[in-house]
Image (tube, rainbow, N blue to C red):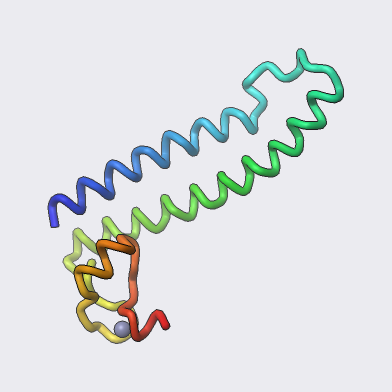
Amino acid sequence: MDDLKQRLEAKLELLLRRGNAIEGHLRHEDGRNELDWADRASLTENDEVLEALEDSTRADVGAIRAALERLKEGTYDECMDCGETIPKRRLEALPFATQCVDCAA
Ligand SMILES: [Zn+2]
């Protein structure tokens, strides 16, 4: 499971970096005050896209942190609902799965 932990940590790192970059854009640290009105209007639309991306990035960060916590506690492959072991194949496809196939259905 060490390999998995590394994969999760690498992914977490990536997402945190992406989150910071998005935040920087949203805080208008890209010099948009220099832009004219039309440019600003299109960037506002862009903000909505960025905000949606920020939300999903934050959700992914939460899921990875939870998975790392479960890994640490040794409950990573335990179904949260029924306590059965989640098959490795399922975890490889869905690294943040917290339920077995039956409970997730
Ligand atoms: Zn289950």
Residue 37: x percent and y percent?
86, 23
In this image, 20 relative to 95: left or right?
Answer: right
Which of 38 and 98 lies nearest the eye of the viewer? Answer: 38
Q: Is residue 14 above or below residue 95?
A: above
Ligand 1's quadrant is bottom left
Looking at the image, is 90 positioned above or below residue 82?
Answer: above
Question: Residue visible at 61% across and 29% down?
Answer: 25
Quarter of the view holding residue 39: top right
Q: Position of residue 60 (x, y in %)?
A: 44, 53
Quarter of the image with the N terminus is bottom left
Question: Which residue is rendered at x = 76% and y = 35% of the image?
Answer: 44
Percent coordinates x, y for residue 22 in the rendering? 56, 34
Q: Quadrant of the C terminus?
A: bottom left
Q: Quadrant of residue 82?
A: bottom left
Find the residue positioned furthest to the left: 2
Q: Residue at x 30, y 79 (%)?
A: 100
In this picture, residue 40 sits left or right of residue 88 = right
Q: Is residue 92 positioned above or below 105 on the image? A: above
Residue at x-position 24% and y-position 75%: 86
Q: Residue furthest right?
A: 37
Quarter holding residue 16: top left
Is residue 2 found left or right of 33 in the rendered image?
left
Q: Nearer the viewer, residue 8 or 93?
A: 93
Task: Tell me where residue 14 appears, x and y as whole percent.
Answer: 37, 38
Q: Please determine whether, in this image, residue 103 is positioned above or below residue 18.
A: below
Number of numbered tags placed on the structure image: 0
